[in-house]
Image: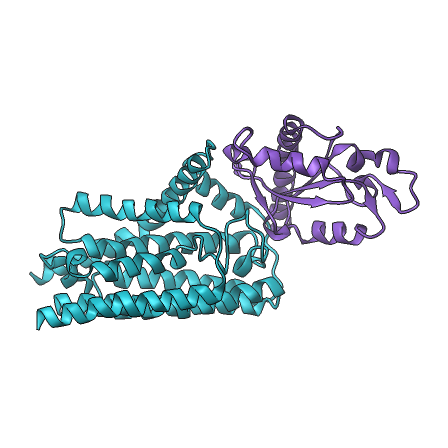
Chain colours: A cyan, B purple
Amino acid sequence: MDTKILMDQILGGIGYLLLAPVLGGLLAGFDRIVTARMQSRKGPPLFQPFYDLFKLCEKRGSVVNQFQNLYMLCFLIFIIITGLIFFTGGNLLLTIFALTVASVFLILGAFSTNSPYSTIGADRELLQMMAYEPMMLIAAMGMYLVTRSFNVRDIIADPFPLVYSLPFIFIGFVFILTIKLRKSPFDLSSSHHGHQEIVKGITTEFSGPALALFEIAHWYENILLLGFVYLFFAAFNPVVAVFLTIATYIFEIFIDNACARLTWRFTVKSSWLVAGVLGGVNLLAAAYLLL
Amino acid sequence: MSFITKSPWILHYDGSSCNGCDIEILACLTPLYDIERFGIINTGNPKHADVFLITGAINEQNEPVVKNLYAQMPDPKVVVALGICATSGNFFRECYNIKGGVDKVLPVDVYVPGCAVRPEAIIDGIVQALGILEEKRAALKKLSSKSAA
């Protein structure tokens, strides 16, 4: 039994390390095509994100601070560590805290450049973290209440679908997922290229290979977040669960295209309200029904 | 195999254009022309850009801005002068405040004349610029491998 768990851990870890950037890149390409179709355009090829990535590696980056690219590298490394904790079936709370550390490195990188746009982007990233952290922790608490474990391994093994026992927490999680996926209406810190309110926000001062690192980290992060969504459907047949996870992502793309950007005040207020009401009600109900 | 021709990101700067050419650039992004098909993205950040599109003539006030933007773009990069004003200064060239076309202050790689320049001409100009971008990339790679050796 122990060797089976070990094998699963090794497979999960290696699978994430190798497949997540590929799947994340394909997901980004799929995202761009779906977005283009929603705007009645044709859109770029599916492999466009990879062309962009390799192009960025061909460019000569410029730096304004000798540490900024090191911070970006740390961001990537900590995202990968976070994903490894999650996909080896590790502790959910540890995953959330490691994800926070990764974001802190990104913010430090942006602050270190001293550029006004970068600084505003970093400020907003901090506010976004403030907005989504409570809901993420509530999601982990809800999963613990139902499955009596913080370990991803045990949560997946639970026979009853979490989306049935935690429906409001799922809705709340999808709400903050928009922030984490950097999609409208909550793309405050770094939006798509087309929206140039604060130039490119947190990534303004990163160019060439350093920006490529950010892209890879973002792909790793997206796969990790979809893994989080998968937990809610894990008790279903795997094919159905993956389908529902992708459907959630397509819903996020739809929201992205249908909404304009909101202010940071609204972002923090609304996400705390959602966390408090939906998360709180669901936690109380789950606790009451299960005790 | 080079990827720079498959994902050219564009920086657009309005020198002293009447907005005619600028609207034609934006028309390229619409469903009719949809230049994102070729991986072209209109970015607002010089540090992420590969192709610098300038519309309108250069005057005393925007000269330092244009030079600054050009300096911030990472190599390899190309400059495209869009419209007759950016190409030569057009009939504004004799004005007291106008320096002339973009080539008075920056090394221009492709000239796309027209008043206003048509979206088809813009796409054609960018495609020609991509050929030059690829040459520059190859030259840069040669240079860096030489300096490493």
Q: Visible in this render: residue A7?
A: no
Could you say where residue A75 lies in the image, as x and y percent from the top left? 43, 63
Picture layout, residue A90 above or below residue A210? below
On the rendered structure, is B51 left or right of A28?
A: right
Residue A10 in view: yes
Q: Nearer the viewer, residue A188 or A96?
A: A188
Number of numbered markers: 0
Q: Residue at x 46, y 69 (%)?
A: A126
Is residue A125 placed above or below B67 in the rendered structure? below
Quarter of the picture holding the N terminus of chain A: bottom left
Image quarter of residue A130: bottom left
Relative side of A66 to A143, left or right:
right
Residue closer to the observer: A107 or A174: A174
**Residue B24 or A62: which is nearer the viewer?**
B24
Residue A29 lies in quadrant: top left
Quadrant (top left, top right, bottom left, bottom right) of the C terminus of chain A: bottom left
The residue drawn where x is 62% and y is 65% is A116
Q: Is residue B93 above or below residue B68?
A: above
User: What residue do we see at 31% from left, 56% from top?
Assistant: A174
The residue lying at 32 percent from left, 52 percent from top is: A223
Give coordinates of residue A281: x percent, y percent: 22, 68
In the rendered image, residue B123, in percent from the top left (x then y), is placed at: 62, 30
The residue at the far left in this view is A1
Give residue A186's position: percent from left, percent from top: 44, 58
